[in-house]
Image: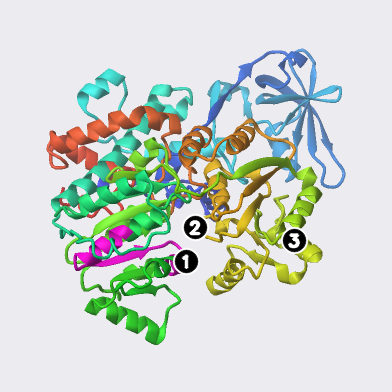
Amino acid sequence: MRPELLNPLFAEATALKGVGPALAKPLERLGLARAVDIAFHLPVGFVDRVPVERLSEGDVGRVIAITLTAVDYRNAAGRGPFRVHATDAFGNYVTLVYFGGNPGWAKKLLPLGEARRVSGKLDAYGQELQIVHPDFVVPLEEAEELPGREAIYPLSEGLTNRRMAQLAEAALARAPDLPEWIEPGLLSQSGWSSWREALAKAHADPEDAAARQRLAYDEIFANQLALMLVRADTRKRRGVPLKGDGRLTGALRLPYAPTGAQSRSVGEIAGDMQQATPMLRLLQGDVGSGKTLVALMALLTAVEAGAQGALLAPTEILARQHYEGLSRLLAGLPVNLAILTGRDKGRAREATLMGLADGSIDILVGTHAIFQEAVSYKNLGLAVVDEQHRFGVAQRMMLSAKADRPPHLLVMTATPIPRTLTLTRYGEMDVSRLDEMPPGRQPIETRVISDERLAEVVDALARHMSAGGQAYWVCPLVEESLKSDLAAAEDRAAGLRARFGEDRIGLVHGRMKGPEKDAVMARFASGDLAVLVATTVIEVGVDVPNATLMIVEHADRFGLAQLHQLRGRVGRGEGKSICLLLRTGALSETARARLALMRETNDGFRIAEEDLRLRGSGELLGTRQSGEARFRLASAEQMTELLPVATDDARLLVDRDGGLSGPRGQAARVALYLFERDAGVGLLRSG
């Protein structure tokens, strides 16, 4: 249960004064549904209001505060702006411009002949000076209340900066004084103020680095403590030691001799599985580094030891692909392999459920359907989770609850993760890294091309197709929207069909239903389709060795990790593969750096480190982390800097300061709830 003193902070945003349904919408667009979200929505900069007595062209572009007197109103014809002509104390003119709405409001603010203190950005429009929508207009007796420095918040349509500041103030008023969870020595050495004071300072002055640092530290500390508690809890539990005898792993006909990294990882996993403490291991490997083979060796080890294994994939397509791939590798071995997805119904599903319950199924491949309540195993010894970033800590624990004793858990990700983030996202796990490529995989040649040369790219695609090659063409959006000029997948497919024929071009996108999408993917995999036009649904794991050309439109709009994942769809067969990144004309510095790096290297681990540097941690994997806690206050730089200290401090709390039962532990418990690191960690209540 969340501590009661936090309840006011976790109230809905509509509990704040003045927040009705109309204001709740723009807040929702920013992800601000509760008072705590608003309190953690920190300003990104500030504006200095320069007090001036006289209007001057030298102040154009600055936000000024000046005493003005309205002398004339001008109402434009139709829906044009309402203008107020005003003068300063020296008779210099300025036009105050109000767009839309009722001119009565501006007249009320600025009665003719009465002086007012006005603040806003001074602009030049032709020969005249103007202020569009002044942010403050107050009687002279209230002029003292004008803030000299004002924080600037990230906003969405329908929300003004001043309103956001008022909401932040209202949310802060609900923030209680909390007991201190930081180790006293570290607190005094850092010179940090209390949590609540730091939060107030961060809103008042965006340049208060110490306040920001303290808040970032708190969030990282809560995260590391939660992971440490999960790990400690897992270490306390007794699992079942699984030691294989080699009769299945030895009989496996491998497509190639394992790389050194694969052999090392297989050894690390086998060593973990022989322990009574359940394994918690992350297998990190770049696209094509051979994770599936390592996972299969682990699953066979479990079967040799008399247990069952389960392989969990994030999508239907991937589950079926794993099932087919494992079926080929297991041909001729006495292993019963089955598949279970949300689409399996009726007798087939019943037969699978019975086989799991009576132990006749050795290995189950499936989507999240495999840990629904109806599914029970006779003896689940090992669970393998593919593409971890789709599954949170809570789902990991649900899967573990599927056995009388917690099964060994191996988590695989094809998204190389920077070391910093490995610690923040998988801090409770041991890590194996596949940093070598299996023999025969050629590096993919990457070229960056201006989208003005689109016609040449289509001609090159024609040559590629006539030589029997297949290609992916990735578009960022499904259909044209009013707010976007991105090339639409449907339009692109229509254009390519007009040139190459209806039956050569397939289209898949995120809004298609599973079976429909699978049917198109199956046609592409079988070679029936030459080109697959897709949104990023093809990003993870799809395997078509004959596809050796990848074209990514608007590549400058993708993150590095996502581009690397997309590029990894080619280069899976013997032929040389090429990835064409089409860019728009006006590139930002970050986009230019991204594309240059893609051209330069195929090393996913290097790309991940750079991605963290260029993007920050929140969106690192290109998709918002479903099921994983986000970092809202800690930047990528702060994470790198503060992570070692926070990890040591959390360890100190668990090992020396009495865990969650001592006085500092009670305070830390509040921090876990405050930063929402309690989800899925059912062991917090017991300490």
Position of 54 relative to 450 (above/below): above
Q: Residue 409's spot in the image, x, y percent?
A: 27, 56
Q: Which residue occupies the foreground of this view, 337 or 194?
A: 337
Task: Tell me if 629 is positioned left or right of 577 in this view.
Answer: left
Real-space Cα distance between discs 3 and 2? Answer: 27 Å
Q: Residue 648, located in which quarter of the rendered image? A: top left
Pinpoint residue 123: horizontal percent, then vertical percent.
75, 25
* Residue 355 drawn above or below residue 224: below
Residue 9, image quadrant = top left
Residue 221 visible somewhere in the drawing: yes
Residue type at mark 3: give it: Ser
Range shown magenta: 297-324
Is 305 one of the magenta-colored residues? yes
Residue 249, position in %: x, y? Answer: 28, 61
User: If you read the primary sequence from the N terminus, does the residue marked by circle 3 or circle 2 appear first?
Assistant: 3
Q: Main secondary structure of the magenta part?
A: helix
Could you tell me which residue is drawn at 80 percent across and 65 percent down? 498
Q: Position of residue 181 (x, y in %)?
A: 23, 33
Q: Which mark is residue 466?
A: 3
The answer to whether 168 is drawn above or below residue 257 in the figure is above
Using the image, determine if residue 632 lies above or below residue 575. Answer: above
Callout 1 environment at 10 Å: few (<14), some (14 to 19), or many (20+)?
some
Of helix, strand and loop, which one carries label 2? loop
Are the two marked residues, 2 and 1, in contact with CB atoms closer than 8 angstroms?
yes
- What amino acid type should be assigned to the residue bearing mark 2? Gly
Mark pair 3, 1: CA separation: 28 Å
State the mark number for residue 541: 2
- Label for residue 321? 1
Determine whether, in the image, residue 149 is placed left or right of residue 244.
Answer: right
Q: Amino acid at mark 1?
A: Gln
Q: Earlier in the sequence, mark 3 or mark 1?
A: 1
